[in-house]
């Protein structure tokens, strides 16, 4: 019975670790310009199952759980889903960016977590203080342009209008004009591929 209990605890730990490793910061905005919306960042679930983010927190480039603040308004991110968190609140955000129909939008607020336009970073923590994403960093902002992060790099690249991999960036029609690709991310596997990844992961764990 003890062996079975230990195996069960180990399985839970593996699933939790796998879930956390599937989340990535995929875009961030640190300077939307006068009259634009607040700072924001985007999170994508590259895994094959939904991830419960209840109690998750964020911090900027101090990457310190003690300085982190709560993520509000979103409790779960589905497989392949991309969500957005806006500093301070979500009022006017969807309208400014053209609707974002079907995209979950949450918020965060607190002292010391505003992104600096001269360079910053962002990371997520679980409720227990474990880093739930890789640390994403970005340099000095180009006003009105977001930074995007692909799967092979956690260093921000300034977004421009066009197609980057499978990701299409666009410009807002309102003033000031902003460039970004909110609600989408580079290289998200399709539903069939996600299912295969889930089966492969289960088989690998069984072989061990």
Image (cartoon, rainbow, N blue to C red):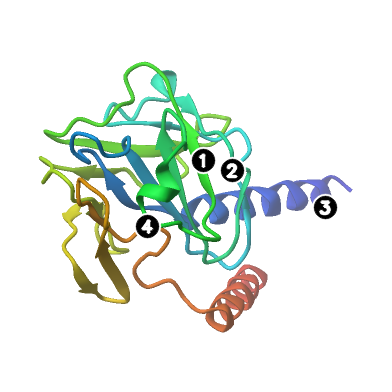
The front one of 137 and 200 is 137
Looking at the image, is mark 4 or mark 3 earlier in the sequence? Answer: 3
Residue 99 location (% of width, % of height): 45, 56
Q: Which residue is mark 1?
A: 106
Q: Alpha-carbon distance for marks 4 and 2?
A: 16 Å
Mark 2 or mark 1: which comes first in sequence? 2
- Disc 4/disc 3 C-alpha distance (Å): 45 Å
Is the residue under label 3 in contact with that under label 4 (CB below 8 Å)? no
Task: Identify residue for label 2.
Answer: 74
Q: Quadrant of residue 120?
A: top left
**Gap in angstroms between the C-alphas marked 3 and 2:** 34 Å
Mark sitting earlier along the chain (4/2): 2
Real-space CA distance between mark 3 and mark 1, rounded to the nearest whole angstrom = 39 Å
Horizontal and vertical percent for residue 43?
43, 51
**Residue mark closest to the camera, 4 vs 3:** 4
In contact (CB < 8 Å): disc 4 and disc 1: no
Foreground mark, 4 or 2, reads 4
- Circle 4: is it few (<14), some (14-19), or many (20+) Cα within 10 Å? many
Q: Which residue is mark 4?
A: 182
Per the image, label 1 sits on a secondary structure element best described as strand
Q: Residues within 10 Å of mark 3 (few under 14, many from 20)?
A: few
Give the label on residue 4, or none. Answer: 3
Left or right: 8 in relation to 193 = right
Q: Residue at x 58, y 71 (%)?
A: 201
Q: Could you tell me which residue is drawn at 26 percent across and 31 percent down?
A: 115
Mark with earlier residue (4, 1): 1
């Amino acid at each position: 019975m003890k062996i079975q209990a230990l195996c069960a605890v180990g399985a839970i730990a593996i699933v939790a670790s796998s879930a956390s490793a599937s989340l990535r910061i995929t875009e961030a905005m640190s300077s939307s310009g006068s009259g634009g919306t607040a700072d924001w960042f985007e999170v994508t679930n590259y895994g094959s199952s939904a991830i419960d983010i209840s109690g998750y927190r964020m911090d900027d480039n101090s990457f310190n759980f003690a300085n982190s603040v709560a993520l509000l308004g979103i409790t779960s991110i589905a497989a392949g889903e991309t969500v957005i968190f806006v500093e301070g609140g979500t009022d006017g955000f969807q309208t400014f960016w053209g609707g974002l129909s079907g995209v979950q939008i949450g918020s965060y607020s607190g002292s010391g977590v505003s992104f600096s336009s001269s360079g910053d970073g962002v990371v997520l923590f679980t409720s227990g203080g474990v880093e739930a994403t890789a640390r994403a960093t970005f340099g000095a902002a180009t006003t009105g342009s977001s930074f995007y992060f692909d799967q092979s790099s956690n260093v921000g690249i300034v977004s421009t209008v066009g197609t980057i991999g499978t990701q299409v960036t666009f410009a807002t029609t309102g003033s000031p004009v902003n460039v970004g690709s909110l609600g989408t991310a580079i290289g998200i596997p399709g539903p069939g591929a996600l299912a295969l990844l889930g089966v492969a992961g289960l088989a690998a764990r069984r072989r061990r």
